[in-house]
């Protein structure tokens, strides 16, 4: 419910401050210029898969309410690369953002609205007051109810301005590819590329420039057959010949925003959906039938151990897909977003985005922890990477080396692992024999994949809209170690009360069908920060105890709440979920409790 509905005191919206605006035709927006509109502030950062999910959740609301609703994307960066205004402009085009975006590199507006997590949504009424705040994804029904109520109320009051929009589309240059994501070497020397921003697959000749054929209409959508539609496709993987002959398709595509796996027959470009319902995963639906499981932003694919492994970036897991058995399910990970090694069913990942098989070993890049990791013998281990908040461009011993949001990788002929270190604009190499990391090439435009083509190393330069063969000159880079810095919450030593605030959307109730509708998982970085209270529970509140001798760290909280429609004959089910990384400083004048808003 909104503050207007509950009778709470109204809070005036804070100023919108930043470096500049995108998608406004050069115009600077402020609260006065937005009066008469229902405004949703979407605090996002373009590395964050949950933020990308919210962009897609907002699209139908923008269409439904037209000019009465203005979404403002407040871009509040995590990684250093995301502070680059050109990189932000590229991301706005790449992800099809069709509303104004405020560039907030110094987190001024983020702090003014007390945002703690990506994504955070704040709803303003047409008179410039804050009426609701919510964190995470899965709020479509709640937003629809709030926006609809505000439109009705302010139409009756005469304070709604339903016409006119501040959005001005930026021009799009013509290029053969537009923000390609992944590439796959085909038999015969051609290369298949996922032309992600154009929602299609493009087959290139060995010169990496000549277009041989195109699979897909280029329209954002979901359609099978010989005129298929995709929605920001990414990863590609060939099936073994015997498997392909039996199932009737040659390769599989990770159709990322559709939350599907699609099979492609190369002879005629025919596409069929082979896994996923098209609904985004919210919870286990109790089936391993590939056509019946929900997926969440599959990003890459690799054939390993007799099946396809799927980098399920949206829920921080790896899944498997067996084309012959037509089954799919969890291969590794728990959905907790962090960095933890160990048995596959206990590991933590953070947006796995690239896979490469190497015999009995499967390599992966975990983009949000800027990590290179591998699976072997039922366990996951980390070669490079220190956690969610540490990144940079540092070569040398793997334990000290740093990357910045890598998205792709391959295994070179000499056994080294080549990594597309995306936000550093570099091609890196990890030598498992020496444990050393080096830089093979720099000044690349957001490299998102790397592959070996008849002795050549080719890179997908996503932000340059091309595939290139860079000159490789191995070097050691002693760059800067970055750590995500946000305002630390001062908390008192010892006992700390944690409360996650959540209220079901209007017309919904908590769903006890499969047990407790609440799940809260608490961990810390460093792990020793918590003396008591770590782990998973079924209550929104929890008493924690902070360890002695540690004065700062990050509390990592994952909360989800299951709800369903209260009165419908066939009630729909909903899952709201958010991960927080809350930097804290332990001091005698700190607060004794911490409150996080999942939905107020």
Image (cartoon, rainbow, N blue to C red):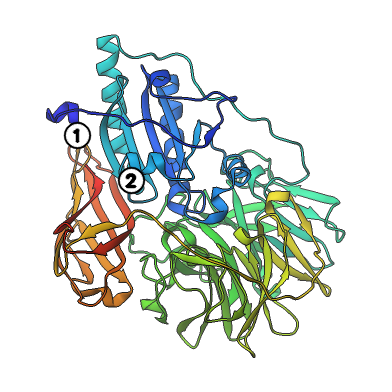
Residue 231 to residue 341: above or below:
above
Q: Position of residue 109 (x, y in %)?
A: 39, 39
Q: Describe the element under mark 1 as helix, strand or loop.
A: loop
Image depth: mark 2 or mark 1 in front = 2
Q: Position of residue 44 (x, y in %)?
A: 44, 45
Q: Position of residue 468 (x, y in %)?
A: 79, 59
User: Between marks 2 and 1, how big is the CA–CA gap?
Assistant: 19 Å
How busy is the neighbourhood of tag 1: few (under 14 within 10 Å), some, or many (20 plus)? some
How busy is the neighbourhood of tag 2: few (under 14 within 10 Å), some, or many (20 plus)? many
For residue 332, which quarter of the picture?
bottom left
Q: Position of residue 427 (x, y in %)?
A: 69, 68
Quadrant containing the C terminus is top left
The residue beneath circle 1 is 1
Residue 472 is labelled as: none
Is residue 302 rendered to the left or right of residue 549?
right
Is residue 227 rendered to the left or right of residue 587?
right
On the question of residue 131 being in view, the answer is: yes
The residue beneath circle 2 is 115
Residue 554 to residue 372: above or below:
above
Q: Describe the element under mark 2 as helix, strand or loop.
A: loop
């Amino acid at each position: 419910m909104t503050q207007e509905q509950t009778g709470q005191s109204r809070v005036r919206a804070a100023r919108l401050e930043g470096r500049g605006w995108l998608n406004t035709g050069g115009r600077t927006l402020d609260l006065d210029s937005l009066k008469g509109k229902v405004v949703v502030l979407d605090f996002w950062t373009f590395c964050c898969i949950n933020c990308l999910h919210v962009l897609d959740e907002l699209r139908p609301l923008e269409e439904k309410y037209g000019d009465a609703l203005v979404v403002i994307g407040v871009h509040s960066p995590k990684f250093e690369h995301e502070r680059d205004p050109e990189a932000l402009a590229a991301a706005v085009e790449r992800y099809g953002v069709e509303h104004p975006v405020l560039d907030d590199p110094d987190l001024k507006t983020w702090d003014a609205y007390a945002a703690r997590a990506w994504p955070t949504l704040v709803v303003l009424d047409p008179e410039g007051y804050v009426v609701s705040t919510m964190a995470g994804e899965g709020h479509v029904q709640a937003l629809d109810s709030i926006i609809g109520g505000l439109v009705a109320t302010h139409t009756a009051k005469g304070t709604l301005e339903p016409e006119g929009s501040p959005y001005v589309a930026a021009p799009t240059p013509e290029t053969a590819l537009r923000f390609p994501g992944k590439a796959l070497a085909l038999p015969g020397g051609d290369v298949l590329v996922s032309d992600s921003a154009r929602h299609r697959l493009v087959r290139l000749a060995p010169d990496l420039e000549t277009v041989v054929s195109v699979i897909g209409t280029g329209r954002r959508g979901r359609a099978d057959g010989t005129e298929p539609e995709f929605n920001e496709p990414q990863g590609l993987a060939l099936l073994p010949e015997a498997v392909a002959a039996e199932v009737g398709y040659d390769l599989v595509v990770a159709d990322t925003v559709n939350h599907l796996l699609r099979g492609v027959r190369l002879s005629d470009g025919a596409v069929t959906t082979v896994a996923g319902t098209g609904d985004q995963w919210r919870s286990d639906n109790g089936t391993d039938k590939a056509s019946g499981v929900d997926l969440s932003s599959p990003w890459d694919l690799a054939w390993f151990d007799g099946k396809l492994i799927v980098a399920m970036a949206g829920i921080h897991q790896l899944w498997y897909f067996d084309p012959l058995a037509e089954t799919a399910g969890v291969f590794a990970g728990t959905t907790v977003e962090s960095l933890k090694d160990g048995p596959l069913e206990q590991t933590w990942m953070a947006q796995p985005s690239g896979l490469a098989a190497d015999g009995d070993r499967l390599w992966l890049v975990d983009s949000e922890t800027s990590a290179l990791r591998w699976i072997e013998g039922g366990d996951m281990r980390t070669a490079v990477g220190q956690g969610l908040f540490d990144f940079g461009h540092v070569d040398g011993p793997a334990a000290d080396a740093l990357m910045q949001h890598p998205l792709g990788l391959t295994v070179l002929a000499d056994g080294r692992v080549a990594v597309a270190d995306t936000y550093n604009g570099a091609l890196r190499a990890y030598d498992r024999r020496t444990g050393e990391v080096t830089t093979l090439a720099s000044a690349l435009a957001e490299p998102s994949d790397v592959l070996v083509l008849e002795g050549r190393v080719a890179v997908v330069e996503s932000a340059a809209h091309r595939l290139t063969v860079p000159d490789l000159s191995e070097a050691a880079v002693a760059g800067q170690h970055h750590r995500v810095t946000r305002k630390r919450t001062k908390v008192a030593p010892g006992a700390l009360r944690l409360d996650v605030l959540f209220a079901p959307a209007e017309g919904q109730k908590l769903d006890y069908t499969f047990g407790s509708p609440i799940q809260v998982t608490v961990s810390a970085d460093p792990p020793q920060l918590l003396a008591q209270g770590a782990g998973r529970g079924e209550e929104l509140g929890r008493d924690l105890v902070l360890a002695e001798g540690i004065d700062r760290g990050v509390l990592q909280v994952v909360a989800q709440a299951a709800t369903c429609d209260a009165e419908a004959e066939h009630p729909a089910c909903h899952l709201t979920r958010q991960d927080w990384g809350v930097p804290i400083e332990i001091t005698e004048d700190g607060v004794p409790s911490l409150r996080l808003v999942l939905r107020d």
